[in-house]
Image (spheres, coloured by chain):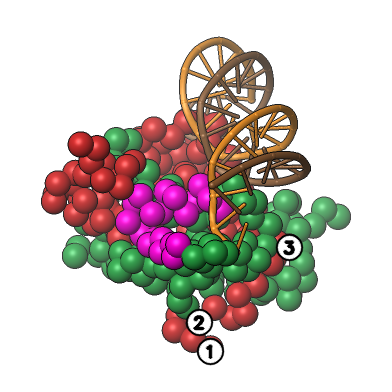
Chain colours: A green, B red, C brown, D orange
Amino acid sequence: MSIAGGLPQGEVFSADCPSRRLLGEVTSKWGVLVLVALKDGPMRWSGLLRRIQGVSEKMLARTLRSFEAEGLVLRDARPVVPPHVEYSLTPAGREVTERLVPLVAWTEEHAARAAAHGERSPAGSGPRP
Amino acid sequence: MSIAGGLPQGEVFSADCPSRRLLGEVTSKWGVLVLVALKDGPMRWSGLLRRIQGVSEKMLARTLRSFEAEGLVLRDARPVVPPHVEYSLTPAGREVTERLVPLVAWTEEHAARAAAHGERSPAGSGPRP
DNA sequence: CGGTATCCCGTAGGATACTG
DNA sequence: CAGTATCCTACGGGATACCG
């Protein structure tokens, strides 16, 4: 690696780089939350729906399917009645989630920090006298 | 911290959590690239526009402005002619970028890996016979 | 050089209803 | 329980033109 952190080449900066699409999916609004929700172990559909507050069935389905196709999430459906389906992270899914967690943790800390010392609205750089 | 990685409480999962908005900005399509582009030092408008291939002026402006308001990016405009404006990361911006870099690096590696061993299209789980 | 303003479009995303 | 189907809206994002 050349510098701190070590981007291989910085290929993401080229428009046609395939990692752009992958990055988009992983960092999508619900994608992040789905991956992080699964980091502690397998979860069922209804569990995800409850845990990730605000997600619609449509978006949960779409997100899970694209992750499944991408090889980040495994879908395990048992043909029983009533249906029992579990979603879990694949090894690749675990890799990316490990890198996602610190980011999410930071946003929580930063949001908390900002709220704590004054709640100055970020809309304007400084308060108008 | 309770568990590996350490999400404080997992507040992101509540719909009203302020970190959701912040997370959205930071993980936005161009947000990621802007932050990572700035990680090696200050850059000028035109430099960013060239380096981040595919970004429009509109989106670059919007992204930089929201980061500036969020306190992640500093805008330094020198009143000379022709205009000279430099963008750089604030300490907070550096913090989040440090957590972003491993993620971006992973997507590059993963995309490269996928391309290397067969380029099986992720659209369908298996090839149709 | 470093932006804004305007128009336009695609898709992420939401609400609701229905099904195996 | 675990989804799909349908309809609809909002906004991210692109192209182009123009301004200090």
Q: Which x, y percent locates residue A56?
A: 65, 51
**Label 2, on which residue?**
B6
Q: CA distance from mark 3 to mark 2?
A: 21 Å
**Label 1, on which residue?**
B2
Q: Which x, y percent locates residue B58?
A: 54, 31
Q: Amino acid at mark 1?
A: Ser
Q: Residues within 10 Å of mark 2 (few under 14, many from 20)?
A: few
Quadrant where the N terminus of chain A sits is bottom left
**Label 3, on which residue?**
B16
Q: Amino acid at mark 3?
A: Asp
Q: Residues within 10 Å of mark 3 (few under 14, many from 20)?
A: few
* Callout 3: SS: loop
Residue range in magenta is A60-79
Q: Residue at 37% of width from left, 40% of height from top?
A: B52
- Label 2 close to label 1 by CB (< 8 Å): yes
Left or right of A88? Residue A116 is: right
Q: Residues within 10 Å of mark 1 (few under 14, many from 20)?
A: few
Q: Which x, y percent locates residue A32?
A: 50, 60
- Count of residue discs: 3
Return the residue nearer the eye: A92 or A84.
Answer: A84
Q: Residue at 19% of width from left, 54% of height from top?
A: B113
Return the residue nearer the eye: C17 or A99.
Answer: C17
Is residue B111 among the parts visible in the rendering?
yes
Earlier sequence position, callout 3 versus callout 2? 2
The chain letter under disc 1 is: B
Quadrant where the C terminus of chain A sits is bottom right
Q: Residue at the far left: name it.
A: B117
Q: CA distance from mark 2 to mark 1?
A: 6 Å
Q: Is residue B128 above or below residue A97?
A: above
Q: Residue at 25% of width from left, 50% of height from top?
A: B111
Q: Is residue A92 magenta?
A: no
